[in-house]
Image (spheres, grey):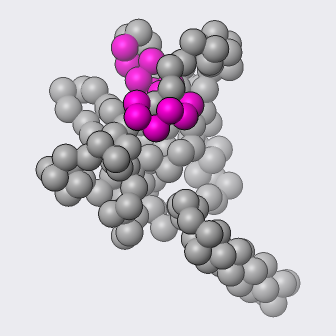
Amino acid sequence: YRRETLIDLIDKHIDSKSVLTLLTASPKNFASLGRIVRYEGIVEIIEKEYLTEEQKQITEISTGTFVFDKQWFLKIFSTMPPMRKLGEFGLPTALAVARENKEKYQVIKLENSEEWFGINTPEELEEADRQKSKEHKNKKTSE
C-alpha cells in the first residue's frame, strides 16, 4: 500500500470511533477469493468456499487489512468462534462479531485496487517477491 493509503485508513478508523475498520478492493483477478456482500446497511465477508453463483459475480473482496480498537479486540478475541467448516480462526470472524453485537464498524474500499496484491499460493508469493525486487531496483535507479 502507499503510505498515504494506510494513514488515511487509520485516520478514518480513529475519526469514526469504530471497533473495526476493514479495507476492501476490487482487483482484476478475484475469482479465487471470498467476497464482500453488502445489503441493507450490513456488510458480510463470505469465504470462497461458501459463495453462491450470484455472489461469485461480486468483484469486491476483503484485503485482509483490518484496524481494530485494541480494547474491543482483546475482549472478543478469546471468545471468537472458528470459521465454519474451515475450523480455523480468522479475522473475518471479528467483523461478524461486531455486526452481531451491533458494534460500530466500517468497510472502506480502496480507490486504486492495484495497490493490493493477495498472496494465497506459493506462486503469488513468488510474484510478490518479483514485484518488490522490481520496485526496489526502480527506486535505486531514480535516486
Is residue 96 rendered magenta in the image?
yes
Q: Which residues are magenta?
A: 84-100
What residue is rendered at 50% in x and 20% in y? 81
Image-quadrant location for residue 11: top right
Decide which of 114, 95 is in the foreground and name it.
Answer: 95
- In this view, which residue lies farthest toward the bottom? 141
- Does residue 83 lie above or below 101 as drawn? below
- Does residue 107 lie above or below 93 as drawn? below
* Left or right, 15 with reference to 136: left
Q: Tell how many labels.
A: 0
What residue is rendered at 44% in x and 62% in y? 113
Visible residue check, residue 12: no
Visible residue check, residue 79: yes
For the C terminus, the image quarter is bottom right
For the N terminus, the image quarter is bottom right
* Left or right, 128 with reference to 92: right
Decide which of 141, 88 is in the foreground and name it.
Answer: 88
Image-quadrant location for residue 127: bottom right
How far across and down, in percent of the image, does residue 2 sit? Answer: 63, 59
How far across and down, in percent of the image, does residue 53 sit? Answer: 16, 52
Image-quadrant location for residue 140: bottom right
What residue is rendered at 62% in x and 18% in y? 77
What residue is rendered at 38% in x and 69% in y? 29
* Left or right, 135 with reference to 4: right
